[in-house]
Amino acid sequence: MILHEKISAQLPAWRERIKSLAKEHAEVKVDDVTVGQIVGGMRNIKSLLSDVSFVDPSEGIRLRGMSIPEVLQALPRARGGKMPLVGALYYLLMIGEVPSNEEAQSVEDEWAQRATVPDYVYKMLKSMPKETHPMTLFSQAVLALQNESVFAARYHEMKKDQYWEAALEDSLDLTAKLPIVAAYIYRMKYFGENAKPKYNPKLDYGANFAKMMKVSDRKGYTELARLYFILHSDHESGNVSAHTMHLVGSALSDPYLSFSAALNGLAGPLHGLANQECLGWLIEVKDKFGGVPSREDLYKFAWDTLNGGHVIPGYGHAVLRVPDPRFTAQMEFAKKRFPGDELVRLADLVFDVVPQVLKEQGKAKNPAPNVDAISGALQYYYGVRDFDFYTVLFGIGRALGVTANYVWARALGQPIERPKSLTTKMLEEVVAQRGV
Ligand code: HAX
């Protein structure tokens, strides 16, 4: 298998680099931790290691060193499409190199071979109460699939340096099954259908997802699915979903257990659920004003949201200090394909007004839009209008980045994570001793 071969070839050199850092340079200081960071959600403490992606606050995400426009330009495209193959992105995340067409296709082929979901998973999903949130169903399905984990089955017979191979098997299996599970949840929950979605091995990952979702503009939605999964794949390792995957995986919980936990973090309104919240906010504006409001009306509405004690979803970021390039890529997609769409025009106006409002309020360190400010509007355009499903879509994309990180964490023998906590009294004593 291509990913296995390529990682095997790279491993000796990577292991040497990590060994040298751990053995010869362990005492070198990287950062100082402040009281503000400890009481402030560990913001910006440099304490995680990932070579898969990096977020530059003034520029945005780089996936294996490549910016979003570079990724969209350089990766092999799906036949007849303008967007790259999702398999090409997975290759890039796993291997750190832009694949050839054949290499990208071989990842797509791996997925096609593994794209089956056991019956008991469908039965379990069907038996849940109707009102269950789709993210709960999605996370449950991943947990149920844990039954199939190669990592868990082989754990007792594997040596430590073989963990990554089982992790790679699980990662390919899991990522192959996620679009099927997600499409099943969508059709079951909102359309009352129980047919098991069928993955067509002749189509790529994005095209299969569009087919299984049964949207009316399949061609357009195929391109959006490819873009969406690529943009949502990774955002370095400190965000809640990626960090959860890393933390749980560090206990050698297999990729299914770890990813189910990551999804539970993604389901929080300050993280992945923000796309659902954001579209809800846009529609509230649209309904209140009977369409796209004037600048003045929107300005007042944004202030009302803040004065009501709410955040404006889709704006602000813990690390970024500029408009998120993932927002920009989605906005460009929408403006190219359906510039007259009311929600897209509204999202554009919000982009013009809300940063100014947040600046005036003076609290948010970053008044610019993040990935969620527009993603729901695009789904809405293609007829996927059940907001609470949007975080599931995010989850499919996020699996690509966090499983690549998981494989490399096992390959490089990253240890169990265990930071140290202090009591409030201890912190106060530190402050008193320093005399500040
Ligand atoms: N609207 C109103 N207030 C905001 C705000 C926004 N969009 N963004 C930040 N603030 C406020 C914070 O609530 C905080 O207020 P308090 O001091 O009263 O607690 C203050 O500004 C400082 O926050 P910050 O340091 O700028 O931001 P944080 O790192 O604490 O939080 C968040 C980052 C993304 C959680 C935050 O900007 C937010 O809540 N945004 C809205 C929700 C959202 O869009 N989330 C999705 C983020 C992207 C993502 O992870 N997607 O999955």
Image (cartoon, helix red, strand yellow):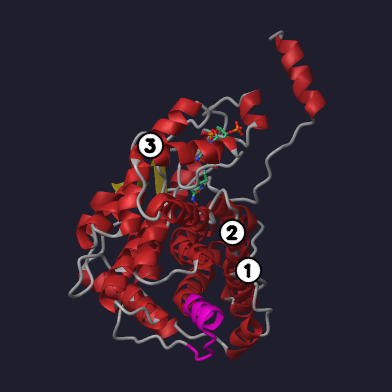
**In the shown orientation, is residue 301 left or right of residue 201?**
right
Alpha-carbon distance for marks 3 and 2?
33 Å
Residue 178, image x and y in percent?
Answer: 49, 74
Q: Quadrant of the C terminus?
A: top right
Q: Which residue was labeled with disc 1?
A: 136
**Quadrant of residue 225 in the image?**
bottom left
Residue 108 lies, with reference to residue 304, above or below; the image says below
Q: Is mark 1 in CB contact (under 8 Å) with mark 2?
A: yes
Along the line of sight, which residue is nearer the eye, 130 or 141? 130
Residue 268, image x and y in percent?
Answer: 60, 54
- Mark 3 vs mark 2: give the one in front: 3
Q: Looking at the image, can residue 248 be seen? A: yes
Residue 299, image x and y in percent?
Answer: 42, 37
Residue 153 lies, with reference to residue 77, above or below; the image says below
Mark carried by residue 296: 3
**In the shown orientation, is residue 70 left or right of residue 133?**
left
Residue name at image x 44 percent, y 53 percent: 282
Type of amino acid under label 3:
Glu
**In the shown orientation, is residue 221 left or right of residue 303?**
left
Q: Which residue was labeled with disc 2?
A: 267
**Quadrant of residue 159 in the image?**
bottom right
Secondary-structure class at tag 3: helix
Secondary-structure class at tag 1: helix
| Crowding near the residue tagged with mark 3, few <14, some 14–19, many ≥20 C-alpha atoms within 10 Å | few
Span colored in magenta = 181-196
Alpha-carbon distance for marks 3 and 1?
39 Å
Alpha-carbon distance for marks 1 and 2?
8 Å
Magenta span main SS: helix
Type of amino acid under label 2:
Ala
